[in-house]
Image (cartoon, rainbow, N blue to C red):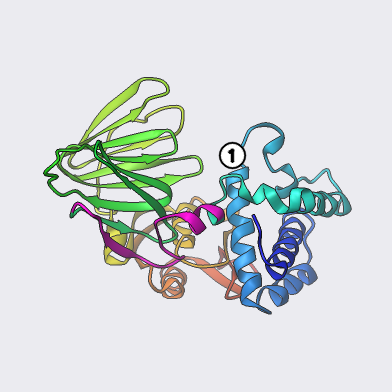
Amino acid sequence: MNLPAEELQAIRAAAQWYARLHSGITTDADRAGWNAWLTASPLHSQAWQRITAVAEQMASVPGVLAAPTLSERHNRSRRQVLRSALLLTSASGLGWLGWRSQATQNLLCDYRTAVGERREFQLADGSTVLLNTDTSVNVRFDGRQRLLELLWGEIIVTTAVDPLQRPFKVITGHVEVLALGTRFIVRGQARGGEVAVLEKAVEVSLPAIGSRMRVEAGQRLDFNDRSLGTLRGNDVSVGAWQKGSIIAIDRPLAALLDELSRYRNGVLRCDPAIADLKVSGVFPVDNTDLALAALESGFSVRVTRYSRFWVRVSSSDQR
């Protein structure tokens, strides 16, 4: 991957800051220094997004390719953590970033959206695909089939009648979703995903193990690269993002913040002490600061903004 020197320098710095902030012994001075670096240049913000995206993916890789250097290790010194990060970023001219990294895939994909963006595209056969925030998709239509490869993110697919009667499939990871004349949602992440059917039905399969399951309208199914989950019913929260909302029904606060963080740049953290606090409500994804303000006014939480890129939600009782 031949990146300009300035981008390489920014990525190296981002990796150092990532390791420092995840060393387990972060200081206020560290956070202030990171914030100053992050806001100094758009290249720094872009590099930070690339590092965090790659770190999430590498956390799911077995063996030595996983990123123990990028996770908290309380039994390692600050010097060891930072030295490991430097070695990792210098190896093969940052070639490790090419390992299925979201950033690399986004550069080459057919359709993509940025963080906080939603866009709809019409495909060559008349089908439409609506991309949620931070989503990347490849399209492969030929004489035998219509294929979407969801590299990352979430889509709503509305299939059109094909005069050639070619099957329509969505592939994400090791999972295949065959449309049976339908409208459906597919979400793909590093550790799995979900299919939710809005109209008609789909067939979800894991060809590697021969597992297959039909999902009807009004149903959803979780999956990972090793197994298919159990069918559940859709609720009002399914697909609410297409109208600009997250609908929470007794949802743990940490899970809600994880979902909200998909729509904003930077870091959104939840204090573990209130991670299980049940939250219900409708929260806008196009204005995440307004969503956080709604949380703060409606629940016993306090939102602390170290910068617009670093936000922490804790108990309002904490001082």
Q: Image point 41% across, 20% down: which residue?
A: 209
Residue type at mark 1: give it.
Answer: Ser
- Look at the image and give the residue range highlighted in magenta: 104-125
Q: Residue at x 68, y 47 (%)?
A: 96
Q: Is residue 238 visible?
A: no
Task: Work out whether residue 144 or residue 47 is closer to the camera in this orientation and state it.
Answer: 144
Judge from the rendering whether residue 187 lies leftward or rightward of residue 77; answer left or right. Answer: left
Within the magenta stretch, is there residue 110? yes
Of the pair 5 and 219, the residue shown nearer to us = 5
Q: x and y percent of residue 99 in the render?
A: 61, 45
Q: Would you identify the image quadrant in which residue 68 lies?
A: top right
Q: Is residue 128 left or right of residue 67?
A: left
Q: Disc 1 marks which residue? A: 60
Q: Is residue 207 above or below residue 2?
A: above
What secondary structure is marked by label 1?
loop
Q: Residues within 10 Å of mark 1 (few under 14, many from 20)?
A: few
Residue at horizontal 44 percent and vertical 54 percent from the top? 109
Location of the C terminus (image quadrant): bottom right
